[in-house]
Image (cartoon, rainbow, N blue to C red):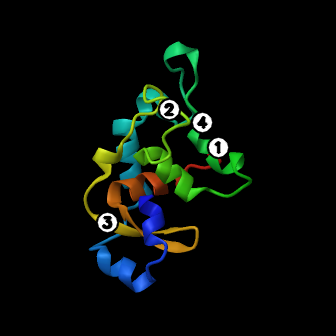
Amino acid sequence: MLLKLYFALPVAAVLAACAVDAMPEPSEGEVLFAENCTSCHGRDARGGILVGRKKAPNLTEITARHGGVFPRAMVMSQIDGYGRGKLPREQMPEFGALLAGEQVPVEVDGVMTPTPRSLAALLYYLESIQGS
């Protein structure tokens, strides 16, 4: 719902709402990934075995699973917990509380959207490792 609220805002309003010195780079997201995601998805982001013998998804194939397009809104929703419902909490924890703080403008489906910096960094990192 949070993402949908910003879709109607003009770009100037979105940029004004974001106090940005510099946009996050994939390397910033890589650090966050290492701290929060590797226990399930592995250091190489190719997935690992979870409790109950289920496998965490290979995060280097997100684009391939979505017809060659990296689904930014879906990925951000999955990380921050907004897309909860498909997976039990034990399989994919909500990281919404970790993703508070400074906002940066991120283009999502053609619309500039204020996004927590750490969420944007993770998004850019995941986008950078597609097909690797």
Q: Please give left or right for residue 12 compared with residue 77 in the image.
A: left
Residue at screen point 53% across, 25% down: 48
Does label 4 or label 2 sit earlier along the sequence? 2
Which label sits in the foreground, 4 or 3? 3
Amino acid beneath label 3: Gln
Marks 3/1: CA–CA distance = 27 Å
Labels 4 and 3 touching (C-beta < 8 A): no
Marks 1/4: CA–CA distance = 6 Å
Labels 4 and 2 touching (C-beta < 8 A): no
Query: Which mark is drawn over residue 61?
Result: 1
Q: Residues within 10 Å of mark 4 (few under 14, many from 20)?
A: some
Reading the image, the residue beneath label 4 is 58
Q: Which element type, helix, strand or loop, lies under badge 2?
A: helix
Residue at screen point 55% across, 52% down: 74
Labels 1 and 4 touching (C-beta < 8 A): yes
Marks 4/2: CA–CA distance = 7 Å
Reading the image, the residue beneath label 3 is 103
Labels 2 and 1 touching (C-beta < 8 A): no
Q: Which element type, helix, strand or loop, lies under badge 4?
A: loop
Which label sits in the foreground, 3 or 1? 3
Amino acid beneath label 2: His
Amino acid beneath label 1: Glu
The image quarter containing residue 14 is bottom left
Look at the image and tell me in which quarter the C terminus lies: top right
